[in-house]
Amino acid sequence: MKRRGVGYASMFYGTGYGNGFPDESRATALIKQEGCIIINVGVSEVGSGGHSVMWQIATEALGVKKELIKIQHNDTSKMHDSGTAAASRQTYNTGNAVLDACRKLRENMIKAMENQSISLIEDSEVIIQIYQQMILKGIETKIEGYFKATSSEVNLETGQGDPYWPYTFGLQKAVVEVDDETGKVDVVDIVAIFDAGKIVNPALAEGQSIGGTAMGIGYAIMEEIQLDNGVIKNRNFSDYIIPTSKDVPNIKTYFIEDLEDTGPYGAKGLGEPVMLPTAPAIINAIYDAIGVRIYDFPATCERVLQAIKNKESKK
């Protein structure tokens, strides 16, 4: 018989490397005589949308039409270190470096125009005019942006310190169906809610939430590295099972935009937090459905059936 259960799990997760580890990002904004602005930033695009997010931040900070801004991220001879695409840090850390560079360049552009108000720049001829005035007046046309995250190593004796800043918060609800004769678990619905500050690109953020949740489903009921004397036995996708589109249910994603004062336009990290509540929410839903706790991931048919047998034997 299939039995349905509902489970919840919440989380908080720090943005960046944390625990006092140097966490720095750099970016460069350069106005060109050809009538465009170049942003050199080492944002590695690994499918998270970092390239688009940096473009959006630069566009907003410079007040320049996006088509007149170019993001260059793949030539290490032209840019400083922006840190890794890891630790859910790119939007917050590297975004702050881009914001710093663009705001300072914008100030120089206004200074070149003798503090005249500059509305949204939509014509490359305007940028050429501003560039010429900057050269004529000896105003810097290339600006370095920098950001360093604030965190400190935790004192293990007192428990005091600021290991991370800022934090992302989230909660997920999972609905599952468990077949108590086969042990098979089907995830039928997920609701995901996150506070990641300002959502810079809602479409990309929703995609990241859905992707992270799919990974969490894999951790909960499918993915398991099998070892034999330290050697991985299941090295390919024929025997290391991950969720397919048929395994991923309808996922409803909601964002609560509690703006972070230190983030670029209030943004925080989102990358890793989206996957963290999924597995515990599913495990809690299994307990709600059949009354057994699964302590070892993943909740395979064999483990669920064994847990049911253990429960029956205690009656």
Image: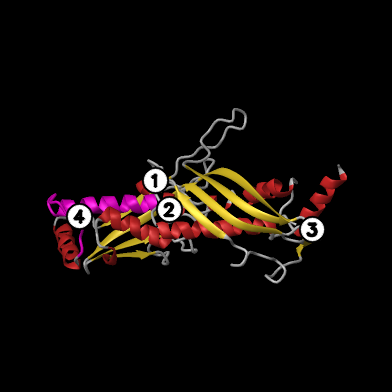
- Amino acid type shown at disc 1: Gly
- Amino acid type shown at disc 2: Thr
Q: Nearer the viewer, residue 14 or 277?
A: 277
> In which quarter of the view is residue 38 placed?
bottom left
Label 4 SS? helix
Residue extent of the magenta highlight? 94-122
Between marks 3 and 2 in the image, the one whose residue lies nearer the viewer: 3
Callouts 2 and 4 close, C-beta under 8 Å: no
CA–CA distance in space, label 1 to label 2: 8 Å
CA–CA distance in space, label 1 to label 4: 24 Å
Is residue 117 covered in magenta? yes
CA–CA distance in space, label 3 to label 2: 46 Å
Q: Kindly identify which residue carries mark 3.
A: 181
Label 3 SS? loop
Callouts 1 and 3 close, C-beta under 8 Å: no
Marked residue nearer the N-terminal end (1 or 4): 4
- Picture coordinates of residue 143 (x, y %)? 29, 54
Q: Nearer the viewer, residue 217 or 122?
A: 217
Marked residue nearer the N-terminal end (1 or 3): 3
Marked residue nearer the N-terminal end (3 or 2): 2
Residue at the extreme front: 1
- Amino acid type shown at disc 3: Glu
Residue shown at 18%/61% (left/top)?
A: 131
Between marks 3 and 4 in the image, the one whose residue lies nearer the viewer: 3
Q: Kindly identify which residue carries mark 1.
A: 263
> In which quarter of the view is residue 129 placed?
bottom left
